[in-house]
Amino acid sequence: MSRTDFNTLLEAGAHFGHLKRKWNPKMAPYIFMEKNGIHIIDLHKTVLKIDEAAAAIKQIAKSGRRVLFVATKKQAKEIVAEKVAAVGMPYVTERWAGGMLTNFPTIRKAVKKMATIDKMTADGTFDNFSKREKLQIA
């Protein structure tokens, strides 16, 4: 994988941050300066962190585990969908349900229930239930 360099990030406009009044104080070490009410992100630190993240992703992929890629910004949606689909990892490019990561066990349970209902519908066992039983299951 090619190393990310400072000039590539600069050309892409990765140095533009949020408005000064909408910042998170934990970002202070990564802010280079403030200009016209917008924080300018330190790209030297960004390059280091991107390389750290790439190394971590590489280790996870080598171990056979899955990585969920999230890109909801319109500029990144198509690129991420194309690249991630090529490697066969899961990804989200549209708005997703709130708490998808923080409330994952509940979401997993709901998905399993839906899969069970789909399976029952496909093999015909769902049709054998009464209307009341169907409503209780669904």
Image: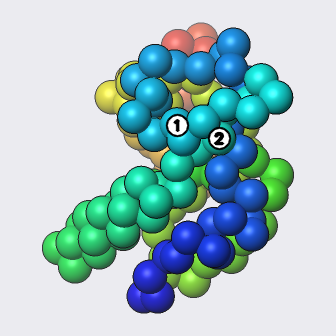
Residue 51 is left or right of residue 19, and the answer is: left
Sequence-first tag of 2 and 1: 1
Residue 38 is left or right of residue 113, and the answer is: right
Residue at left offset 77%, top offset 23% = 37
* Front residue (pair 93, 119): 93
Residue at left offset 21%, top offset 72% = 59
Amino acid type, residue under disc 1 in the picture:
Ile
Which of the 4 image quadrants contains residue 81? bottom right
Task: Classify mark 2: helix, strand or loop.
Answer: strand
Residue 42 position within the rendered picture, expressed as x and y whole percent measured from the top left? 52, 49
Q: Badge 2, how many Cα within 10 Å: few under 14, some, many 20+?
A: many
Q: Are marks 2 and 1 in contact (CB under 8 Å)?
A: yes
Residue 78 is left or right of residue 22, and the answer is: right
Amino acid type, residue under disc 2 in the picture:
Ile
Residue located beneath label 1 in the image: 31
Which of the 4 image quadrants contains residue 41? top right
CA–CA distance in space, label 2 to label 1: 6 Å
Residue at left offset 56%, top offset 70% = 6
Task: Classify mark 1: helix, strand or loop.
Answer: strand
Which of the 4 image quadrants contains residue 104? top left
Q: Quadrant of the C terminus?
A: top right
Residue 32 position within the rendered picture, expressed as x and y whole percent measured from the top left? 54, 41
Q: Is residue 63 visible?
A: yes
Residue 27 position within the rendered picture, expressed as x and y whole percent measured from the top left? 46, 29
* Front residue (pair 97, 57): 57
In the drawing, what numbered circle is on residue 40? 2
Residue 136 position within the rendered picture, expressed as x and y whole percent measured from the top left? 53, 13
